[in-house]
Image (cartoon, rainbow, N blue to C red):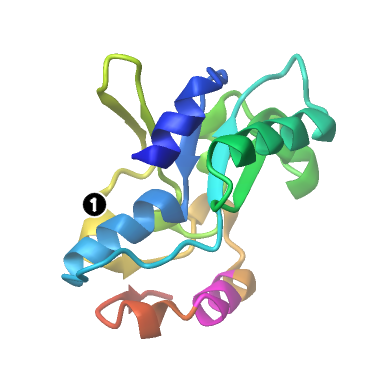
Amino acid sequence: MACLQAARTLNLPDWYLGAGFLRNAIWDHLHAKKSMTPLNDVDVVYFDAGDTSLETEREIEARLRKLLPDVEWEVRNQARMHVRHGHQPYSSTTDGIAQWIEVPTCVGVRLEFDQNFTFTAPFGLGENWSLKVRVNPNNARPTIFQQRVEDKQWLTLWPELQILD
């Protein structure tokens, strides 16, 4: 909650905490873990076509570090990420999230000022809750997919996962 509250204070356009922040929490719950798996970083994604500078992302990270210095923040404006990946321009944060490597990672959550949660999940949340992991059909890069599964040691951390080819 502290990460969601910190990100909310910045009032970024179309923002979410994405990827492992939500994915790992679901997998931890389904594996009945008593404590959450530590995150390598917390991914803050937003969409601002009017300012796609790396400097702005770094400034946002610095502001977040002041709020929660023990968190490794990674901020990415999805309005510029299409260039990095050689795609057509994204139309929103959700459109950018829909390009991530594996389907269960294509998720995000934010805390609204009324204390409600807003979720984005271009492929739905069904695969997260089923413990099935497959490569994103919209951005099929099976070699990178397999490397991420190994590097992140998902089957060690969550042995009930089913990695689909």
Q: Which quadrant of the figure has residue 41? A: bottom right
Q: Nearer the viewer, residue 62 or 99?
A: 62
Q: Which quadrant of the figure has residue 79? A: top right
Q: Against 63, is 24 above or below?
A: below
Q: Image point 72% across, 18% down: which residue? A: 49
Q: Which quadrant of the figure has residue 141? A: bottom right
Q: Image point 47% across, 51% down: which residue? A: 19
- The x and y percentages for residue 3 are 44, 40
- The x and y percentages for residue 39 are 47, 61
State left or right for residue 151 relative to residue 135.
right
Give the quarter of the figure containing the N terminus. top left
Q: Image point 20% across, 72% down: which residue? A: 31
> How many numbered marks are there?
1
Q: Main secondary structure of the magenta part?
A: helix
Q: Residues within 10 Å of mark 1 (few under 14, many from 20)?
A: few
Residues rendered magenta in the picture: 145-152
Q: Secondary structure at mark 1?
A: helix
Name the amino acid, label 1.
Gly
Circle 1 residue: 126
Q: Against 11, is 24 above or below?
A: below
Q: Is residue 107 visible?
A: yes
Q: Against 125, is 88 above or below?
A: above
Q: Against 76, is 102 above or below?
A: below
The answer to whether residue 136 is magenta is: no
Q: Image point 43% across, 76% down: which residue? A: 165
- The x and y percentages for residue 149 are 50, 76
State left or right for residue 133 relative to residue 127.
right
- The x and y percentages for residue 26 are 26, 57
Q: Is residue 121 visible?
A: no
